[in-house]
Image (tube, coloured by chain):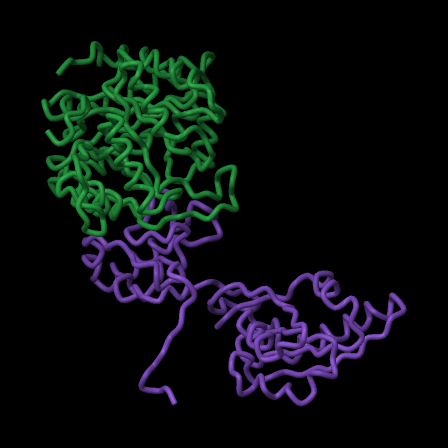
Amino acid sequence: MKSGSNLERILESGHFAVCAEAGPPKGSSPKVIQKKGGPLKSCCDAVNVTDNQTAIVRMSSISGCVLLKELGLEPVLQMVVRDRNRLALQSDLLGAAALGIRNVLCLSGDHQKFGNHPTAKGVYDIDSIQFLQMVKTMRDEHKFINGEDISGDVPFFIGAAANPFADPFEFRVTRLAKKINAGADFIQTQGIFDVAKFVEWMKMVRDRGLHERTHILAGLIPMKSVGMARYMRNNVPGLSVPKVLVDRMADSKDPKEEGVKICVEAIEQLTDVEGVHGVHVMAVAWEDIVPRIVEEAGLMPRPVV
Amino acid sequence: MIVGERKPFDEIVGFVRDCKKILIAGCNECVTVCCAGGKKEVGILSSALKMAFSKEGKDLEVKEVTLERQCDPEYVQQLSEYYDQYDAIVSMACGVGVQELAMSYQDKLVFPALNTNFMGASQGQGVWEERCQGCGACVLGRTGGLCPIARCAKSLLNGPCGGSMNGKCEISKDVDCVWQLIIDRLTGLNQLQMLEDIFPVKDWSCAGHGGPRKVVREDLKS
């Protein structure tokens, strides 16, 4: 075991994993993240805590992770290289390890232009792939990026993101390979709406044998309204929402129900794709729908490993 | 070239409001090519300032001069014979030129008339784009000759990020994704395998994060 995390144990023992996401608040109350965590506890193997998502300042990801841990959930610490240089990243990793956080997801982060501090300097001292390499070196060699020794263990199960829907399509698999070579034990993908395109990507992944070298968790974003569907189709770079799904949301008398249905259908299709080892449900501001989706997708109860 | 554009007129007026005689110094290099601070622009600024002063019932005497280069002491010295007759110098060079004047003429106020934008290239009439950030350790040999430091919004060395769509950067549909351009170019050259290796962490110290930079060529020093 690299980290001994629940997520690692689930995946390494061959179970199909379920992750969800809880975004910290724009404020200091612990209740927000506790409330989001509550319903996720029994239906997920691990819960991602986002790191100033969409470049909007929020309670720190590490704090959110600790609050979830106190409730008995297993957190995945998301970290972006936008806001921290190599010193801060390594320092926070040591702190996270000391606090018992065992999963980390290494990300570039949305550009600061999109957030609520658009004039901030983006750090980007190292990029997400170099970040993965750094965490792996810290864990496996007990060394900082400068080669100096680290005292104590840094036991992280290391994750990375992949977006099969961004361009250029073919190179996305090469970039995935780089992330795996850099140290990614697991991958959480961008939200999948265009299952056919994802299946095509997975074939390319399998052709290079990458599915055997990492655990790929397929990302899902349940849609709450037709407005959300349209917004994601038209305004979010790197998302591919087929028109047929927007139409289904528009034609439905109960869009929330339709959104759940679409999500469950996608999960059912994705569980059959060779090399997909789990799902990652990103129910932004709709965390309490996750138990129902997991239940209806036939993924309950969660295994105890 | 270094690309600059003239500051808002009111800002320049603010600098010289209390002057009676000013020297406006253009530069015959980059800022002439990008039509921001050459002989022609010196003339236009001079006329505009005189007009603005005259509207307020004030006189302004302006000496117009355009130096061959303001980034070279040899040319900056050409002002030494007469600069002291003026209340202030307004430089229409890039930030380098403004500072060369300021350091050469310690007893004279020097104001910038331009905002210095970037090192870039002309992309048609009236359009310039950034191409180089002077990071001090050129990566172009590994990126198909196109710079991800200057042209990727995140300066990713192992791009493209997940926001690349239809060849465009996530920050704007008007910005090309340089990683798409790099991949297209290396694909055409049958060199895409260059991108398989992880690009190592970059030394940013020579990019300005190690403090102000200096180049010393021992072989050329006098």
Q: Nearer the viewer, residue B19 or A34?
A: B19
- The part of the image, by quadrant, that contains residue A161 is top left
Residue under the point 24% across and 64% down: B189
Given residues A74 and A202, the one toward you in this image is A74
Q: Which chain is purple?
A: B
> Which residue is found at the position 53% from the left and 84% from the top?
B73
In the image, residue A226 sits, relative to residue A120, either above or below, namely above
Residue B33, compared with residue B180, is above or below; it is below
Instruction: Give the position of the C terminus of chain B as an image quadrant.
Output: bottom left
Q: Residue visible at 38% across and 33% down?
A: A51
In the displayed structure, would residue A301 be above or below residue B11?
above
- Residue A55 sits in which quadrant? top left
Can residue A96 be seen here? The reply is yes
A153 left or right, relative to A239: left
Residue A31 screen position, x and y as percent? 43, 15
Q: Is residue B98 left or right of residue A88?
A: right
**Residue A224 in the image: x percent, y percent?**
44, 19
The chain coloured green is: A
State whether residue B105 is above or below residue A210. below
